[in-house]
Image (cartoon, rainbow, N blue to C red):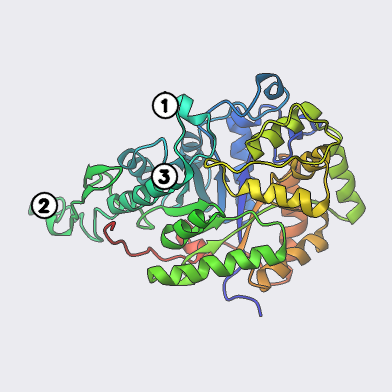
């Protein structure tokens, strides 16, 4: 039985496209990460496709590995996401604008103020994707000798998120009366002055930005570890997952939704949207030919570097035809390492096979097929309780996004799975989310 609300869709922007070799594709825009006009057109195209949100990830470090390998890929530079979202707000009307900011190397008051401002600029379409920075090199960007261990990053993130939401709740509804006759601009009785002193932060409110049309930005998160699941259950309103099987996606979905009950939350107040790379054609063979073209453009140096970085383990001394060596556990990397190792063992992949296997989606699920096959897969996951929708990852921009909107979206609409028009003006309206209550951090 189909869920009451429609399937939620995010459009995940990644410079040039999500495939590792996207920038080398004949139809790719090679300067995609810094070409504002191009990105504006992608946002408008996504809005035409009735996507719920335009999403951008981020890292606060240039370094992802060895310099020689990095010269072969396009992911070194891009427009800082928050700045970009402010620009996109002026060229779109309905699509949500969600970008990444780290709790490990940012400050709650500054972040709360920025995103509250974006929420006003966009008339209630802003969202914050909370991350804890899994890239060790980010510590160097801020002059720290050591990157914070994962368990500490998540403790900090929990306090950070609660403090930000406390600041976003500084002003109650109707606080700004603006009565010229009496001379009263705001009602002091509707002002909540937050006083916070915790393990990591000490801050006094209120935030000096009024609330937006949706009250406060939507809180988004990605993470599949136990710490990540717990943080999502307590704080998140949208979660971007990375699952490789229907069974794994159902387990993640059920587990996180059940954990929400421990915090008195309605499971429907969180939308789980796993990443999905879609390479689609009118026929299966057409789609496979498109993906084959991309796979043949992978530089082995770049493939090894991608895998080394994602595993947090240097593979440069190994033959690409060797099986994946034993990857030692560490206290920095995320659950994505376990996912990649599981893929390699389960599918008996060599190092070359594995980097080709993840070159498109970096551990997210990928489907290569006709528009009906893509819609079948999406419908199955949605109806089977594996997700509330998907964060779509086009392999190449703009071609793959256009293909998805032209071929898949109408099929989803015909099946009653996707909307025919936007449900409202704000991101909360379109995600079927109400503003959550806030309580002081404990």
Disc 3 is placed on an element classified as: helix
Residue at the location (23% across, 60% down)?
174
Residue 388 shows up from this direction = no
Q: Which residue is mark 3?
A: 152
> Would you say 139 lies left or right of 112 here?
right
Q: Are marks 2 and 1 in contact (CB under 8 Å)?
A: no
Task: Please tell me which residue lies in front, 337 or 64.
Answer: 337
Question: Residue at the location (37% across, 56% down)?
Answer: 213
Q: CA distance from mark 3 to mark 2?
A: 45 Å
Which of the pair 110/43 is nearer the observer?
110
| Label disc, if present, on residue 184 of the rendered structure | 2
Q: Is residue 159 left or right of residue 344?
A: left
SS at mark 2 in the image? loop
- Residue 251, compared with residue 102, is above or below; it is below
How many residues crowd mark 2 within 10 Å: few (<14), some (14–19), many (20+)?
few
On the question of residue 302 being in view, the answer is yes
Please provide percent x and percent y for residue 235.
41, 58
| Name of the residue lying farthest toward the bottom | 1
Front residue of this view, candidates 301 and 216: 301
- Around disc 3, counting alpha carbons within 10 Å, would you say few (fewer than 14), some (14 to 19), or many (20 or more)? some
């Amino acid at each position: 039985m189909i869920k009451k609300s429609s399937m939620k869709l995010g459009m995940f922007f990644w410079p040039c496209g999500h495939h590792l070799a996207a920038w080398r594709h004949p139809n790719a825009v090679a300067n995609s990460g810094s070409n504002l006009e191009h990105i504006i057109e992608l946002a408008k195209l996504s809005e035409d496709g009735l996507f719920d949100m335009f999403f951008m990830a981020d890292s606060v470090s240039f370094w992802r590995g060895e310099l020689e390998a990095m010269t072969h890929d396009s992911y070194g530079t891009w427009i800082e996401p928050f700045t970009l979202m402010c620009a996109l707000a002026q060229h779109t009307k309905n699509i949500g604008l969600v970008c990444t900011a780290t709790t490990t190397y940012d400050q709650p008051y500054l972040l709360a103020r920025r995103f509250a401002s974006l929420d006003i600029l966009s008339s209630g379409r802003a969202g914050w994707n909370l991350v804890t920075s899994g890239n060790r090199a980010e510590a160097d960007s801020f002059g720290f000798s050591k990157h914070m261990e994962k368990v500490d990053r998540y403790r900090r993130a929990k306090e950070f998120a609660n403090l930000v939401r406390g600041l976003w709740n500084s002003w109650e509804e109707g606080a700004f009366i603006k009565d010229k006759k009496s001379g009263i601009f705001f009602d002091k009785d509707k002002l909540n002055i937050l006083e916070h002193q915790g393990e990591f932060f000490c801050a006094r409110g209120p935030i000096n930005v009024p609330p937006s049309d949706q009250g406060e930005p939507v809180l988004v998160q990605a993470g599949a570890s136990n710490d990540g699941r717990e943080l999502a259950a307590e704080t998140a309103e949208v979660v971007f997952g990375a699952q490789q099987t229907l069974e794994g996606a159902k387990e993640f979905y059920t587990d996180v939704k059940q954990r929400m009950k421990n915090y008195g939350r309605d499971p429907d107040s969180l939308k789980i949207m796993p990443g999905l790379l879609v390479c689609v054609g009118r026929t299966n063979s057409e789609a496979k030919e498109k993906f084959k073209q991309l796979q043949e453009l992978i530089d082995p140096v770049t493939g090894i570097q991608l895998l080394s970085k994602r595993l947090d383990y240097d593979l440069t001394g190994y033959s690409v035809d060797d099986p994946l060596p034993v990857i030692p556990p560490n206290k920095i990397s995320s659950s994505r390492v376990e996912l990649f190792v599981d893929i390699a063992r389960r599918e008996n992949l060599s190092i070359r096979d594995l980097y080709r296997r993840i070159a498109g989606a970096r551990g997210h699920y990928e489907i290569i097929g006709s528009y009906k096959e893509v819609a079948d897969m999406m419908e199955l996951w949605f109806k089977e309780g594996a997700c509330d929708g998907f964060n779509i990852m086009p392999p190449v921009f703009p071609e793959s996004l256009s293909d998805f909107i032209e071929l898949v979206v109408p099929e989803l609409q015909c099946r009653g799975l996707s909307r025919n028009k936007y449900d409202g003006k704000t991101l909360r309206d379109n995600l079927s989310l109400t503003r959550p209550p806030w309580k002081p951090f404990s």
